[in-house]
Image: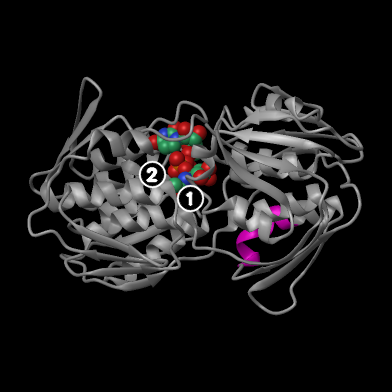
Amino acid sequence: MEYLRIRGGRELQGSVTLPGAKNSLLPILAAGILCNEPVTLKNVPDLSDLHASLQILRAVGWQAEFVQGTIQLLPAEKMKSIIPEKAAGAMRSSVFYLAPLLHRTGKVELPSPGGCRLGQRPIDIHLEGLVKMGATAAMQGEVLTLCAPNGLQGTEFRLRYPSVGATETLMMAAALAQGKSRLENVAKEPEVMDLARFLNRCGAQIRGAGTECIEIEGVPALKGATHTLIPDRIVAATLFAAVAAAKGEVHIKNVCPVHLAGVLELYKRMGMQLYQPVPGELIAGMQNRPKALGQLKTGPYPAFCTDAAPLTAAALLTATGETVIEDTVFENRFECASEFANLGARAMKQGRSIHIWGKKSYSGGSARASDLRAGAALVCAALGAKGESRIGGLEYIRRGYCDLEKTMQYLGADIVKISD
Ligand code: UD1
C-alpha cells in the first residue's frame, strides 16, 4: 500500500515548468495512427495513462519509444484492429483509437473503456457521428465493434453537447474521410485546437478548431510530423490551488494564461496575486485566507473547467465564508467532499455540487483519492492542513501527474511517498 504522508503548513516557494498537457497527448497519440510516416511528440509527461496508450499502439502493431519527454512512433507493417482489454479498461481515452483504427483497418474492436468514475460517461455522440459517416456499430457482450470496410464519408453533424472527446474522435474521422465534413456545436478546448494543429501539420485540412464549428476537407493520406504539446493547464490550476491552500509564491513557466482564463479570474477574486513577469510565465502568490466565492458553476471552455473544480474546492477550505460549486459537466465530480471532511475541513457533496464552509484551519487526517483530480485536490488540501495527513489512491494521481510529490517537495512542502 502506497500513500503520501504530508505535513501541512509549509509555504511553497520556487519555480515549476509545466509539462505537456495530458489531454492533448492522449488524442494526439491515437491520431498518430492516421499517419503513414513516423511521428515525434515533444514535451511529453511520464503518466500512467501514457503507458496504457503506448500499450495500445504496440498491440495494434506500431513501434513506440518514450525517451526523456519525447515519443517516437513508427508505423506498423500490418495493423491489427483489436484494442487489448487491459489497456482499454485502464483508461477512457482508449475510445480515441476508434476512428484511427477504423480508417486504417476498416474495423475496430474495443472492450468497455475504463477511466475515472465521474458519472456514466457514455460515448453515444462519438458513435452517432461515426455512424453518420458510414460506420456500423454493434455490441457483443462488453465488446464494441465498429466496421467501415469502404472507408468513412464526410458529413454534416451537430453534436448534441460539445463533448471534448467526441469532437476529437470526429475530427480524426473526418480528416481522412472522403469529401467535406462540417461539425457543429463542437468543443472549443485548447486541447481540441492542439489536435487540429497536429493533424494539419500532418497534411489534414481542418479549419475552425477553437470555434463552435469545424470544417474539414478530407484528404487521402497523412504524412508524419514533429509536434510539441501545449502546456498542461490543469497542472497550472493544481499549482494555484496548492499555493492558495499552503500560501507562498510560485513562479510557473511554460504556461499559457489564455487557456486558464476561467480559472485565473476565480483565483484573482479569491485574493491571489497573479502576474505575468514575461510572456509564457506566471507568478502566483497568496499570503492570506482566500475570500469565499459564493455560487460557482463549471462549464465547457472557456468557462471554469470541471477538472479544476475539486482543486478550487481544496483552495477554498480555509476561505472566509461559504462557496458552492456546481459541476454541470460530470454528475459525480465531488466524491472528494467526504474526504475533505476526513481531513477536518467542512465540505459536503450535494447532488452535482460541493458546498464548502471555509474555516480558519483544519487538522489533516487520512483520505483516499476516488479519481485523478480528486486525488490532486486532496494533496492540495493536505498541504494547507495544520497537521499530518495520509493520502491514498496514488494510482489515480499518477494518471495525470508525473511525480506530483517531487514537484511539491521541490517547492518546499513536507511530503513523502510511503510504501507499506
Ligand atoms: C475530456 C477530458 C477530461 C475533462 C472533460 C471535460 C481528455 C482525455 N479528458 O474528457 O479531463 O474533464 O473532457 O472537459 O481530454 N458525453 C456524452 N456522450 C458522449 C460523450 C460525452 O453524454 O458521447 C457527456 C459526458 O458523460 C460528460 C460530458 O458529455 O457528462 C462531457 O464529456 P466530454 O467532454 O466528452 O469529456 P471527455 O472527452 O471524456
Residue linked to disc 2: 166
- Please state the horizontal and vertical placement of residue 166, each as a whole percent of the image: 38, 44
Q: Residue at x 85, y 33 (%)?
A: 362
Q: Which mark is residue 187?
A: 1
- Please state the horizontal and vertical placement of residue 375, each as a whole percent of the image: 60, 38
- Ligand 1 within 8 Å, label 2 CB: yes
**Secondary structure state at the residue bearing disc 2:** helix
Q: Main secondary structure of the magenta part?
A: helix
Q: Quadrant of the C terminus?
A: top right
**Is residue 209 among what the camera can see?**
no
Rendered position, 280 above or below 325 = below
What amino acid is labelled 1 in the image? Answer: Ala
Rendered position, 342 above or below 301 = above
Rendered position, 310 above or below 219 = above
Proximity of marks 1 and 2: CB atoms separated by less than 8 Å: yes
Q: Does residue 227 appear left or right of residue 109 in this picture?
A: right
Coloring scheme of the render? one colour
Q: Which mark is residue 129?
A: none
Q: Nearer the viewer, residue 350 or 69?
A: 69
Query: Which residues fall within the magenta stretch?
Result: 256-264
First of labels 1, 2 by sequence position: 2
Q: Is residue 108 magenta?
A: no
**Secondary structure state at the residue bearing disc 1:** loop
Q: Residue at x 35, y 32 (%)?
A: 124
Farthest residue, direction front: 420
Rendered position, 383 above or below 208 = above
Q: Nearer the viewer, residue 234 or 376?
A: 376
Farthest residue, direction bottom: 278
- Please state the horizontal and vertical placement of residue 174, each as a whole percent of the image: 27, 55
- Ligand 1 within 8 Å, label 1 CB: yes
Q: Nearer the viewer, residue 121 or 377?
A: 377
